[in-house]
Amino acid sequence: MSSPTNTAPILTVQALQEGCAACSMHQLCLPMGLDEADMLRLDQIIGRRRRVKRDQSLYRMGDTFNTLYAIRLGHFKTYQMNSNGSQQITGFQMAGELLGMDAIGTSRHQCEAVALEDSEVCEIPFVQLEALFQDMPVLLRQFHRIMSKEISREQGVMLALNNMSAQQKLAAFLVNLSSRYVTRGYSATRFQLRMTREEIGNYLGLAVESVSRLLSSFKKNGIVDVNHRDLELLDLPALRSIALGTPAC
Amino acid sequence: MSSPTNTAPILTVQALQEGCAACSMHQLCLPMGLDEADMLRLDQIIGRRRRVKRDQSLYRMGDTFNTLYAIRLGHFKTYQMNSNGSQQITGFQMAGELLGMDAIGTSRHQCEAVALEDSEVCEIPFVQLEALFQDMPVLLRQFHRIMSKEISREQGVMLALNNMSAQQKLAAFLVNLSSRYVTRGYSATRFQLRMTREEIGNYLGLAVESVSRLLSSFKKNGIVDVNHRDLELLDLPALRSIALGTPAC
DNA sequence: CGTTTACTTGACTCATTTCAAGAGGTGTGG
DNA sequence: CCACACCTCTTGAAATGAGTCAAGTAAACG
């Protein structure tokens, strides 16, 4: 672990006491737009923080669904199991995002969520959340917005995976990560890849070797600088235009 | 038509004939699980039937979002526009399915919905639907179930498009159509393709020629019989095993 | 400090696309 | 009702992007 920010125990205790209002991610997950009173009510149903160590599962495919999870800290991947036992990664999630919504329909988790690094989530018991919906329309609307965005996001991914060249896919992937980090207040151009090349390839439908080759070629062309997991996007506009399929550059 | 009923007086014959209760698709869309009184309340907010002729748009990308649409009759495709103006089909929808959920997040439609044949939809004003949610928890739960299923469906599609061969993709596509027709009371093995080969190819990320070739090869192997749009699945188990990647057959 | 895992790079192969040509339907207007 | 034009679909041959196989290097880990 090479995280520069040292998590002092005092800070954690404070955060535990102060709930959603104190969470730097509350702009992104459910509490957005709630007034103080409502936020307090939401805090009360949020059961406990749960730490998930790297490579640990938050939930497994087929688990009965009881709670949603708001990521407070860290990164996750979700994947489905193929018939032949191989995994297909369906997404990478970061702090401020909600996990488990795919299970609402069937009451069972349709995929498995695994932490890519030591992470922390807020458990949101779904039955109690539903009860809150009855007299907190703002919360309900926010919930619908998040689910709807998830649908749009996946449509976008489909678009990307369907008709794009390997180069376009990877460029689009990096641009997407960048914009999500910006929303969270991090740098748009410098971040760490939390996933392996293999996981990227699995997600994008590319061989590991292709991912590696493409990163190398981006580096050679001065579009990115990459050393292992450390990534710098040197020419974000170029990346964008590659992702869009513009032949230039 | 005018047979005596022992239902509550509030339930008119007119309502029975024209409302959700009379719709053969009401098991599939929102009314599922509602009692008669609730169904009547839902009927009251459902504005009007809307006919959509073949090739007409139900809504366009960027349109402001006001209503959801339950397909009552016919078929649609939804697609997003690529940067270079080409369309990427994100799904084919049939009677009993809900359209427009991707727009809830942004209040604007993220894609365009076009009828593949003369079709009919029920307009569901979203603001009024939200109002109903407040005292019809069953309706809300059903709505969440549908959205969640949409998320799962798209994850499944991603899985299919990512790591499958062209043959697997097409087999999976046909099996998927088949199972959806079964749910609607139609034959599992005989139906018409409502979309062109080009649209299938676009959706699956294949060239038109590949779709055509694959259909021909399925036909040659006695797995399907196909003439233009008329399709018969002669060996559904074989199709399934192709979709799953089983080498046999 | 050795072992394992992650990553890189090169050479070859192959599935799918692209290009090309033609056949079969469908619809429109005369 | 026919003729013409326009799609849609089919099939073959050639081109190619990405995968597979193989080997080696570098980092992470216990």
Image: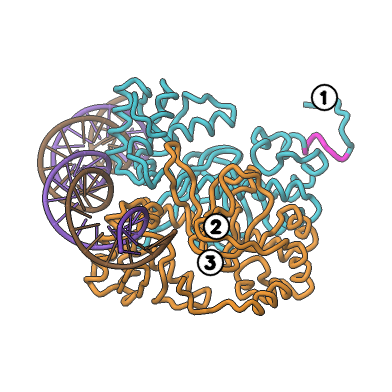
Chain colours: A orange, B cyan, C purple, D brown
Helix or strand or loop: what does disc 3 sit on? loop
Residue of label 1: B3
Q: Confirm whether residue A102 shows in the render.
A: yes
Q: Residues within 10 Å of mark 3 (few under 14, many from 20)?
A: many
Residue B111 seen in render: no
Residue A167 lies, in percent from the top left, at 29, 60
Q: Which residue is mark 3?
A: A74
Count residues near mark 1 (Cα–Cα under 10 Å), then give few for <14, some for 14-19, many for 20+.
few
Q: Marks 2/3: CA distance?
A: 19 Å
Taking A51 as reference, is B54 above or below it?
above
The residue closer to the viewer here, B189 or A65, is A65
Q: Using the image, name the chain to which the residue with label 3 belongs.
A: A
Q: Is there one chain holding both mark 1 and mark 3?
A: no
Residue carrying label 2:
A150
C23 sits left or right of B84 in the view: left
Q: Nearer the viewer, residue B183 or A150?
A: A150
Q: Is residue B60 above or below residue A72?
A: above
